[in-house]
Image (cartoon, rainbow, N blue to C red):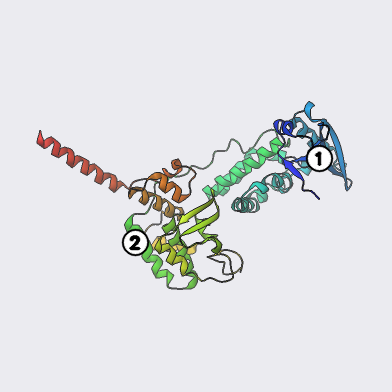
Amino acid sequence: MAAKRRLRLTDAAIARLRPEEREYTVWDTRTPGLGVRVRPTGGKGFILLSQADGRSRRTSLGAAGLQNVDSIRRKCHALIAEGAPAGTKKSELLTFRDFVAGPWREAHFPKYKPSSRRRAHYALARQLVPAFGATPLERITRAQVLDWFDAYSATAPGGANRTLALLRQILNFAIACGHLTANPARAITPNRRSPLTRFLSREEVHRLHRALDRHGMRSAFARQQADIIRLLLLTGCRRNEILALRWSEVHPDALALEDSKTGPRKVPLNARTQALLARQPRGANPFVFPSPRDSDRPRSSTLRLWNTVRREAGIEDACLHTLRHTVASHAVMSGVPVPVVSRLLGHTNAQMTLRYAHLADRDIEAAAERIGAAMARVIALE
């Protein structure tokens, strides 16, 4: 059986469809059941495939050239609502949970990278479905969204921002499908992010390594966490890139990451990083840092050792992402060109790298002193 043809139907996309020897149907990726039937004669017509009384029903919606896709989508949702059992309201069929599990997931999950899919699944399971799952889409209010966002922001402002963006995208898709006329999450202001000005000095890096050495000798579990933290500082990788690192991605002179934030990329390995990876035990688990409880999964994203060593090193205000920031900042201060640093970090453009390329205050003060001394010598010659 031939695979279904799927396409995000737009007026322009439908106009580009060409007839073939046999009739075929292209199904919309946004509205389940909506399709365009293309006949060998070149005629095109909208159809809706729906369920009624346990049976499939195919409804003709008219010629494609006489109606635009948006009006057809609205007609589809009206027909589906009319086909509901007697006494059932449209809003009861379209709870947030049902919409996410059906139309939204079908339209968006196939396009996501595995890491994006995991993040979306986590945000839905832990936050959005518990908060809005039983609520009909059209009854979700701005006040309800704001109460949820404020409560989540109190413990995880960054996570609240990311999940709010996902909620907006879901509700915008509900508008496109004809279920809503306005997005109740649209006017909510995300939490302000602190500027990325924190990086570790040479002395702080030294204190951190001493703390890692002390704890790394206590147990294999602590040594694994210490090595993960060292890898973050030696490579500038993102946390999940190291936590989910597979042995198949480890090569003699580079990491060939298959699923980084910006897509596949290579991370060159220096001698110290190569030695650190070489000492990791290699068993049946495909991950370099496996879970101690599950034989075929990576360890969890919780690194309890980090809170301990940053306190001992006197860097309580630093987070794990500070290590990536430290790599970028010290590279720039050492004279490495920003475009090169950008490639090392896997940024899509050098402008993103400039956020990390801050100079320490003492370096600026030292430069000012050198300039002042040089000018004083010039003045003395006058």
- For residue 201, above or below residue 210: above
How far across and down, in percent of the image, does residue 113 sit? 61, 50
Which element is circle 2 on? helix
Q: Is residue 283 above or below residue 122?
A: below
Q: Quadrant of residue 189?
A: top right
Question: Which sits in the foreground, 85 or 38?
Answer: 38
Residue 91: give x, y in percent of width and height.
77, 40
Is residue 226 at all visible to an observer of this figure?
A: no
How dense is the environment of label 2, judged by Cα within 10 Å: few (below 14), some, or many (20 and up)?
few
- Determine the residue positioned at 59% across, 35% down: 187
Residue occupying the point 52% across, 48% down: 158
The kind of residue on which mark 1 rests is Tyr
* Amino acid at circle 2: His
Q: Position of residue 20 (x, y in %)?
A: 80, 37
Measured in 3D between alpha carbons, the distance from the residue under mark 1 to the one under mark 2, in whole angstroms, is 66 Å
Q: Inspect this view and state whether residue 249 appears.
A: yes
Given the current orientation, which residue lies at the most extreme top position?
A: 66
**Mark 2 — residue?**
206
Is the C-beta separation of discs 1 and 2 under 8 Å?
no
Q: Earlier in the sequence, mark 1 or mark 2?
A: 1
Residue named by callout 1: 24
| Quadrant of the frame with the C terminus | top left
